[in-house]
Amino acid sequence: MERRPAFPSSFETHFIDIHEVLPEEEDKGKTQKIDKADHKRINRPIKVRDTNKRPHRSLNRQVSLETGFSVHNWESKAKDDRRVLTRSGRSLGGFDSANRIGLGAPKGDFSLFKTKPTLSKQNPLLPSRKEREMVSQRKDGSTGLDDSVNESVPAGRYFAALRGPELDQVKDYEDILLPKDEKWPFLLRFPIGCFGICLGLSSQAVLWRTLATSPATKFLHITPFINLGLWLLALAVLISVSFTYILKCIFYFEAVKREFFHPVRVNFFFAPWVVCMFLAIGAPPMLEPQILHPAIWCSFMAPYFLLELKIYGQWLSGGKRRLCKVANPSSHLSVVGNFVGAILASKVGWNEAAKFLWAVGFSHYLVVFVTLYQRLPTSETLPKELHPVYSMFIAAPSAASLAWQTIYGEFDGLSRTCYFIALFLYVSLVVRINFFTGFRFSVAWWSYTFPMTTASVATIKYAEQVPTIISKGLALTLSFVSSTMVAILFFSTLLHAFVWHTLFPNDLAIAIKKRRLVKEKKPFKRAYDIKRWTKQALTKNSSVNKDSDKAGY
């Protein structure tokens, strides 16, 4: 192909005719169709146009050499880029689009999840986020690049991109927004599941207070200072974890929003308020006043109830986050708080509020229990093998029995019914040998210790009503098991935090993309049309033959 300069040396742009017909399968907006008239002149010799005599008006077939080069190289480049997605966090749109429009996360740049400044909202002269996105799309010429962390990720997307009972592991074919091969900032790696440590320690404070004050275990002569030490330790851990997570909310609020949209981790936002109520219930006798002030219950239960209205409303509305779609064993955390709040309300003297919370909690517990027991569309979130997450099934019935006993003052028939349900579920899980084997340690495991502790406290209350050797022995056995598990997790957490430095790995679950970029290659549209036309032709011929046969008879 010959080409001669058609402009003076001061101009650097050259225009040539491109006769190659691009396939129809190329992406939209990147190629232009060639008219039938162009096919007739496709074999003619190339003529260099003199732009001084005839200025060009349209760019139907005239493109710059740089553009033509990029168009011709697109096909080969696309084939290489679509086969494998690297897990480096840079392939946000393919073809190096991340570097061109600024949507990608370069190495060491975690600004995607930082709290967005409100300066653009206050100053109308500054461009808004939508305007910046439109400008970047115009520069890139694309309209399908999403992955805006400001938008909520659908619940189904978490199930499609993540695996594991806690939905904390990214599937192999998924790409993430942040680099995987480097260590993220500490606040970005600090998950909401750390409040599970507070749940385990605060529930242990309640257990050892019950062991020290219950008539059924009076023969043990347990000192109340164990309860005091555990209570102070739980309070210190709660303050440190809360302070750290508040810092995360300040500096990485977009990551906090991702955790709130997570189907499993959204339940851990109930944990801080449950911990506060546990600390109020299990306060040492030497520090506890004679009667708790109702303001304590209001300050802890009000935020829990508001969050409960949000979550239960999503379950009831039937939207994308309805219960049958997002239910998992951690959903019991959003139910247990009602029973714990009922116990605290009864202690402050508000029995009617306690009865109200008990009714709300028990009704939703039945729905959650049946949904998980039937393994409806959420069966993929429940692991086939045994996992500590199954201990969450014990929490709600145990807490329900304790709440009923606290409200009415006796361990009657309904309270015993809830306790026996919890005891059966407890035994069905403990009899398995591989209860805690073969799984990667996680901070979220702490949340699975408080159901065992709650069952131990319920057994002690049952032993008070039925003071037999079997009931007392069962109470001591369950208390020993729960305390042992908490001690093991406590030392394991210390080893992972200060010796192995593996307690807070990169939180890949919050860095998934809103849409999966790699999709299965669909057949060509022309092939679909051929199949459809062939099918229609066969059906028409068969109908015509039937009509002719009928006419012949």
Image (cartoon, grey):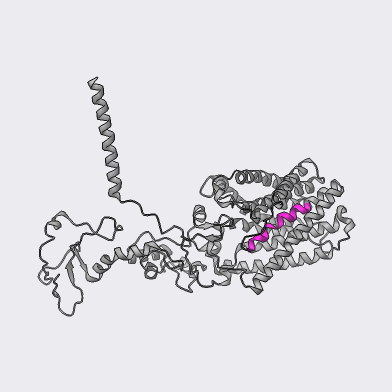
Q: Is residue 523 above or below residue 41?
A: above
Q: Which residues are magenta?
A: 441-457
Quarter residue 43 falls in: bottom left
Q: Residue at x 26, y 22 (%)?
A: 550
Quadrant into which the N terminus falls: bottom left
For residue 399, side relative to residue 153 (left or right): right
Q: Position of residue 513 (x, y in %)?
A: 46, 60
For residue 428, side relative to residue 15 (left or right): right
Q: Residue at x 56, y 46 (%)?
A: 324
What is the number of callouts on the image?
Answer: 0
Quarter residue 202 falls in: bottom right
**Magenta stretch encompasses residue 324:** no
Tell which of 275 and 442 is nearer to you.
442
Residue 290 can be seen, yes or no: no
Q: Position of residue 342 (x, y in %)?
A: 73, 50
Q: Position of residue 272 (x, y in %)?
A: 67, 60
**Magenta stretch encompasses residue 448:** yes
Tell which of 385 and 509 is nearer to you.
385
Residue 526 can be seen, yes or no: yes
Q: Residue at x 66, y 74 (%)?
A: 498
Specify the principal SS of the magenta part. helix
